[in-house]
Image (cartoon, rainbow, N blue to C red):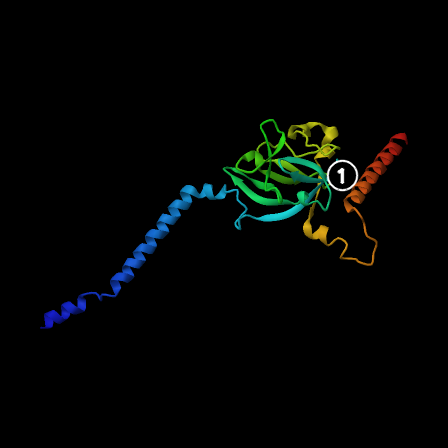
Amino acid sequence: MSQSISRQRRRPPVYRIPVLLSILIMVLCKYIADALIEKDGTRFLTDNSISRFNVRRYYKFYSVCSGKHIEIIGSSVTALGNSDSPNANLILQSAHYQNHHGIHIVGVRSGRFLCFNKKSKLITRFSGGSPRCIFEEQFSPEYFTTLKSVYNKNWSIGFNRKGKPLLGSDKSKSHRNRCFYFTKRDHSYLDGLHETNPYGPKIANPHKLMHFLHEKEIKRRKRHSLNKTKQ
């Protein structure tokens, strides 16, 4: 009798079996999930969809050379957009492709990605699954924004005075450097530009004013350097 009682005590309770099974299943699921992430992690990183996992910002880019904004209309891209043009609204979102890391530039209205083709021509695509569609922001010595290609460090986005895109490789021509400069403005600045000081004078186009002041500063420096050489 005492032996049967001791055997019953040694036997594990029935409710412990499902608990142990559930713990075992959780451990297996974690192991499988870690293996999948390690194997296919790059596939999730190269997803070009605009999702909540990407860092996104909305901006407009004012071209110093054309005096207008970058805009994407259908399959074409120009620098002829006004500040209130809906086609000039661009999304900057984080981008990853294999060993390339940077940003995608996407038109809000068109949903197209800015890319370079093999000949460094600026084009648009519905998919950004290429290293030629990834860019990085840098600053020029004059504190303008430049958009360089991650695929080729010598390629940059630029537009001529008529707003037509230049070849990315034309950046090597020094006399065209300013055509690869931009001023980046976010939507909060553009929308609230005249709301911060309602009683002051309103500027119809602040980007043109900034461009004018910059040109005046360059002319002043040239005159100053000429006076020094004459002395």
Q: Residue at x 35, y 52 (%)?
A: 29
Instruction: Look at the picture and state if 121 lies above or below 46.
Output: above
As drawn, which residue projects farthest toward the left?
A: 1
Inspect the image, locate mark 1, and give the three-letter code of the amino acid beneath it: Gly
Split into 4 quadrants, where in the image is the C terminus?
Answer: top right
Depth order, front residue of 142/134: 134
* Residue 190 location (% of width, % of height): 72, 50
Left or right of 1, for residue 220: right
Quadrant in the rendering for residue 165? top right
Instruction: Look at the picture and state if 187 lies above or below 16.
Output: above
Quadrant in the rendering for residue 192? bottom right
Q: Residue at x 42, y 42 (%)?
A: 40
Q: Which residue is mark 1?
A: 67
Q: Residue at x 65, y 28 (%)?
A: 169
* Residue 15 location (% of width, % of height): 25, 66
Depth order, front residue of 55/153: 55
Depth order, front residue of 8/208: 208
* Residue 80 location (% of width, % of height): 72, 38
Left or right of 173, for residue 44: left
Split into 4 quadrants, where in the image is the N terminus?
Answer: bottom left
Instruction: Look at the picture and state if 7 lies above or below 200.
Output: below
Left or right of 22, for residue 44: right
